[in-house]
Image (cartoon, rainbow, N blue to C red):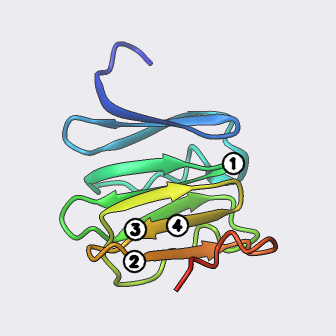
């Protein structure tokens, strides 16, 4: 994309997202369900992960998750106010790790994929 320099990259079903050095997220490709146009503005992210048609990222300042794009199964409904150290988006579910290593998942759980072991 025009010679921009990125620090990380995440590839979804039909879209790609990347982080610039300051943490700004940029996405390109098919804008199904807001996968490209839904990127939160004026937010610096530490990391991101792209799923089928959605992307989730962790805010640099707080570790809170923000997600955008397809949300039919709740995969873009990140838990409010929780801080995470890493995040991974699947086709229609998302999981993130808390600082203590506990996994929290949300979205489609039809095969138990969003039910982390206790």
Q: Nearer the viewer, mark 1 or mark 2?
A: 2
Residue furthest to the right in view is 110
At 76% from the left and 69% from the top, the residue drawn is 72
| Residue at position x 68%, y 49% in the image | 53
Q: Residues within 10 Å of mark 1 (few under 14, many from 20)?
A: some
Q: Which residue lies under the disc numbered 4?
A: 95
Mark 3 vs 2, N-terminal side: 3
Q: Secondary structure at mark 2?
A: loop
Of the pair 93 and 66, the residue shown nearer to us: 93
Label 2, label 4: how far apart the Cα atoms are: 10 Å
- Mark 3, residue position: 65
Mark pair 1, 3: CA separation: 17 Å
**What residue is drawn where x is 28% and y is 77%?**
100
Residue that carries the numbered disc 1 in the rendered image: 52
| Residue 105: % across, % down | 55, 74
Q: Which residue corresponds to mark 2? A: 102
Instruction: Report how far apart the C-alphas of labels 3 and 2 lie in the structure.
Output: 15 Å
| Picture coordinates of residue 34, whole percent (x, y) | 63, 52
Sequence-first disc among 1 and 3 = 1
Q: Viewed as shown, does residue 75 lie left or right of 65?
A: right
- Viewer-nearest of discs 3 and 2: 2
Q: Earlier in the sequence, mark 4 or mark 1?
A: 1
User: Do the CB atoms of the residues marked 4 and 1 lie less than 8 Å apart?
Assistant: no
């Amino acid at each position: 994309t025009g010679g921009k320099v990125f620090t990380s990259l995440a590839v979804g079903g039909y879209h790609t997202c990347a982080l610039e050095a300051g943490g700004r997220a940029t996405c390109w490709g098919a804008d199904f369900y807001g996968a490209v146009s839904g990127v939160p503005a004026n937010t610096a992210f530490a990391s991101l992960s792209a799923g089928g048609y959605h992307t989730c990222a962790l805010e640099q300042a707080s570790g809170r998750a923000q997600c955008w794009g397809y949300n039919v199964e709740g995969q873009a409904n990140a838990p409010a106010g929780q801080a995470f150290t890493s995040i991974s988006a699947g086709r229609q579910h998302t999981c993130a790790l808390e600082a203590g290593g506990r996994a929290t998942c949300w979205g489609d759980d039809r095969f138990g994929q969003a039910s982390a072991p206790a």
